[in-house]
Amino acid sequence: ACDALTYVPSVNNSFFEYETSPMKIFEYMAARRPVILSDTPALREILDDYSAFFIRPASEEDFADALAAIRTDEGEVRAARAYDRVRSNTWEARVQKIVQELPRML
């Protein structure tokens, strides 16, 4: 029962910028709600501008703008796109990708 799901750490460091890939992002995508994220390379590997709302880390103005945007049709459109993306991120799909790559790795 929420309008949006957010992951906007205010701490800028290499872990949050390049190394994190929180499972909660995939849970957010599966919830079919608009997602608001800090604009970092790590999070852009998961979603893009067509499936989430990105804000500058710690930007209250960007956060307020994103909250306003989720109330438009665009919020529903991006939530649907995020859901479509997460449907292919299952454990079974991951195993299939690994099995396909094994011959190249050996």
Image (tube, rainbow, N blue to C red):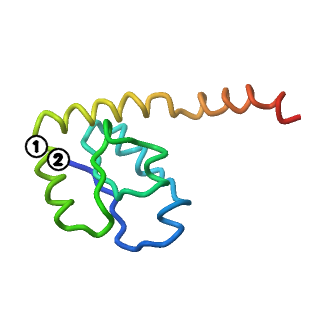
Residue furthest right as drawn:
106
Q: Which of the image's four quarters has the C terminus?
A: top right
Position above or below: 11 against 28: below
Position above or below: 22 against 12: above
Q: Is residue 20 left or right of residue 85?
A: right
Task: Work out whether mark 1 precedes mark 2 in sequence or the reverse, and give the earlier one.
Answer: 2
In the rendering, which numbered label is found on residue 71? 1
Q: Residue at x 17, y 47 (%)?
A: 3
The image position of residue 77, as x and y in percent, is 22, 31
> Label 1 sits on what residue type?
Arg
The image position of residue 1, as x and y in percent, is 18, 46
Q: Is residue 33 left or right of residue 89?
A: left
Q: Residue at x 32, y 37 (%)?
A: 51
Position above or below: 29 against 100: below
Q: Which one is nearer the viewer's eye here, 89 or 42?
A: 42
Is disc 1 surrounded by few (<14), some (14 to 19) or many (20+) residues within 10 Å? few
Q: Nearer the viewer, mark 1 or mark 2?
A: 1
Q: Which residue is mark 2?
A: 3
> Label 2 sits on what residue type?
Asp
Q: Which one is nearer the viewer's eye here, 84 or 66?
A: 66
User: In the rendered structure, are the residues bearing label 1 and label 2 in contact, judged by CB atoms less than 8 Å apart?
Assistant: yes
Count of numbered marks: 2
Helix, strand or loop for disc 2: loop
> Disc 1 and disc 2: Cα gap in Å?
8 Å
Position above or below: 61 against 70: below
The image position of residue 10, as x and y in percent, is 34, 71
Helix, strand or loop for disc 1: loop
Is disc 2 surrounded by few (<14), some (14 to 19) or many (20+) residues within 10 Å? few
Q: Quadrant of residue 58?
A: bottom left
